[in-house]
């Protein structure tokens, strides 16, 4: 879709004149593709098994 096509679609959808739409500065944004928004921790741990081990608190000795 070209910018001119986009402006025409906005004009038809809003009922405004083309000059009004151009003065308001409408623009067409292209969103980048994203990967999944989740993490497979089992797969991560297989790649780096020792890095993600839980830390355990050390018990203090009674003096």
Image (cartoon, rainbow, N blue to C red):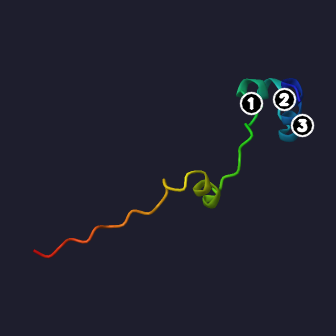
Q: Residue at x 14, y 76 (%)?
A: 62
Quick check: 43 above or below 31? Answer: below
The number of numbered badges drawn on the structure is 3
Question: In the image, residue 34 lies at what x, y percent?
Answer: 71, 43
Specify few, some or many for label 3: CA neighbours under 10 Å numbering under 14, 14-19, or 20 or more. few
Say above or below: 61 vs 2: below
Residue 28 placement: quadrant: top right
Name which residue lies at 83% across and 34% down: 16
> Spatial distance from mark 1 to mark 3, Cα to Cα?
14 Å
Q: Nearer the viewer, residue 35 or 51?
A: 51
Under circle 2, the secondary element is: helix
The secondary structure type at the circle numbered 1 is: loop
Q: Secondary structure at mark 3?
A: helix
| Residues at marks 2 and 1 touching, judged by CB atoms closer than 8 Å | yes
Q: Nearer the viewer, residue 20 or 31?
A: 31
Q: Quadrant of the C terminus?
A: bottom left
Taking the spot 89% from the left edge, 28% from the top edge, the residue there is 5
Alpha-carbon span between mark 3 and mark 2: 9 Å
Which residue in the protein does label 1 denote? 26
Of pointers 1 and 3, the one earlier in the residue sequence: 3
> Does label 2 or label 1 sit earlier along the sequence?
2
> As rendered, which of 57 and 4 lies closer to the eye?
57
Viewer-nearest residue: 4 or 37: 37
Q: Which residue appears farthest toward the left when viewing the image?
A: 63
Mark 3 in CB contact with mark 2 (< 8 angstroms)? no
The residue to which callout 2 is attached is 7
The circle drawn on residue 12 is: 3
| Disc 1 versus disc 3: nearer the observer | 1
Q: Earlier in the sequence, mark 3 or mark 2?
A: 2
Quadrant, the N terminus: top right
Residue 24: x and y, percent?
A: 71, 28
**Distance from Cα at disc 2 to Cα at disc 1:** 7 Å
């Amino acid at each position: 879709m070209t910018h001119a096509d986009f402006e025409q679609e906005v004009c038809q959808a809003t009922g405004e004149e083309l000059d009004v739409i151009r003065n308001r500065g409408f623009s067409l944004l292209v969103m980048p593709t994203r990967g999944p928004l989740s993490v497979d921790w089992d797969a991560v741990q297989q790649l780096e098994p020792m890095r993600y081990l839980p830390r355990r608190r050390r018990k203090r000795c009674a003096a």
